[in-house]
Amino acid sequence: MGILNIFSRGLWSPTSNRDLVDSEKELLKGMKNVQTRDVIIDEVTGDYLHTIEIGVDAVDGDASTQEMDGAASSQPSARHSRAPLVIWPGFGMGGAGFGLSFPALSQKIGCERRVFTVDWLGYGLSSRPSWNAKTVPEAESWFVEALEKWRAINGIDKMVLMGHSMGGYLSVAYSERYPERVEHLILLSPCGLPKPPSAHEVAERRRNLPLRTRVVRSCFLSLWNTGASPQQAMRTLGPLGRAQVLHYPHRRFYENNQWTDSYTKEKLGEYLYHMAAAPGSGEHMLTTLMLPGAFAKAPLVERIPKLKVNHISFIYGKSDWMDCNAAEDAMRIIKGEDCVDNPTQVAKEAHGASEQPAVKASPTDRDTNSDNGRLRVLKDKAFIVEKAGHQLYLDNPLAFVDAVVTSLNQPNIVRT
């Protein structure tokens, strides 16, 4: 990774913690009843998780900011009678990326639940300790234990855990380890669901690629195998990398009249840039946990059927590059049906799959799933958000929140 670090600091990729904080404030400017704070999860290291709470009664003006080193600085009101909703963003995103959905979340869910977004340890506005995980279990624990400390500090007994993309993958890992803390698991376009294609399928597909594509793919895989992250590449490109990130919101998202005078594509671009330009930390989980092509080394399709949480839901965008068929495969396994193994195309926009084998997971044993009840599929089709792609909460925030509300009342999977 050394060559990617040569120009990744200083004037080449200018940023600072103040720039990052200000970029979030700009996105949240004008939003009422929104509070941001840093929850210290380790008194020795000083590590903290940046948190946004939506629907806070005490905040009447613009989003307020507080530092927090112990118990929660805001307490649930009498109307918050149900388990809080905790949102874990995807790779390269922070909690403020859900900002366009905050008003609807506050109105439709915040009336009975507290609603939080939590930036990953090592990304967003959370602290960025040195990354030292080398295995899948170590990498998963790095994030899972941080969220568990955050939960305990906030005095949350059970929560609705909602993770997007890579945050969905990590939410499954959390639910495996702490099922008693998850009332409902909502997976938004989760990453790493299907099994990776076989080495034979990879070789066949590679042979059919044009020469130039094979060369580009080879370069991509070489960088991947060094552990390089997309953020490192952006920092190395300096002004060109910054320009690409700032332009990203203009070419990526659907137009559903969702943008506002304060929450603009330009401000979102600045926010995304300063998160990516900050010192690398949690971003390095990508190559530790994943294979190229959005395939996981420990695929979720083999892990979700063994979860011991009471409710599970899947939500995808209509034009999502994550294939909802993978979620339906997991539900077919729960129902005892055959599912599609080794799909050749799950991530429609993926660069291609690695020749590395997936981490072997133990076979699903439906009988052992009965010690605390059995999973039962009530709805075998994922919830779909129309006029939306992978970033469904940005593409169509109102329809996204409606899908979340529906999934809360009508989950795909329940434990009986």
Image: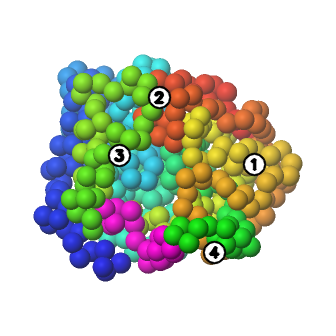
Lower position in the chain sequence, tag 4 or tag 2: 4
Amino acid type, residue under disc 1 in the picture: Asp
What residue does disc 1 label? 329
Residue depicted at x 48% and y 70%: 216
Q: Is residue 2 above or below residue 312?
A: below
Q: What amino acid is found at the position of numbered circle 4 in the picture?
A: Glu
Question: Residue 167: which numbered mark, if any?
Answer: none
Q: Distance of mark 1 from mark 3, alpha carbons? A: 32 Å
Residue 182 rendering spot, x and y as whole percentages: 57, 43
How crowded is the residue under tag 2: few (<14 C-alpha within 10 Å), some, or many (20+)? many
User: How many C-alpha atoms fall within 10 Å of the one at disc 1: few (<14), some, or many (≥20)?
Assistant: many
- Observer-nearest residue: 34 or 396? 396
**Residue 118 falls in image quadrant:** top left
Residue bearing mark 2: 396
On the rendered structure, is 111 left or right of 402? left
Q: Earlier in the sequence, mark 2 or mark 1?
A: 1
Determine which residue is flagged by label 3: 248
SS category of the residue bearing label 1: helix
Visible residue check, residue 171? no
The residue positioned 23% from the left and 69% from the top of the image is 8
Q: Where is the C terminus found, in terms of image quarters? A: top right
The image quadrant of residue 297 is: bottom right
Structural distance between the alpha carbons of marks 2 and 3: 17 Å
Does the residue at mark 4 contact the one at mark 3 (Cβ under 8 Å)?
no
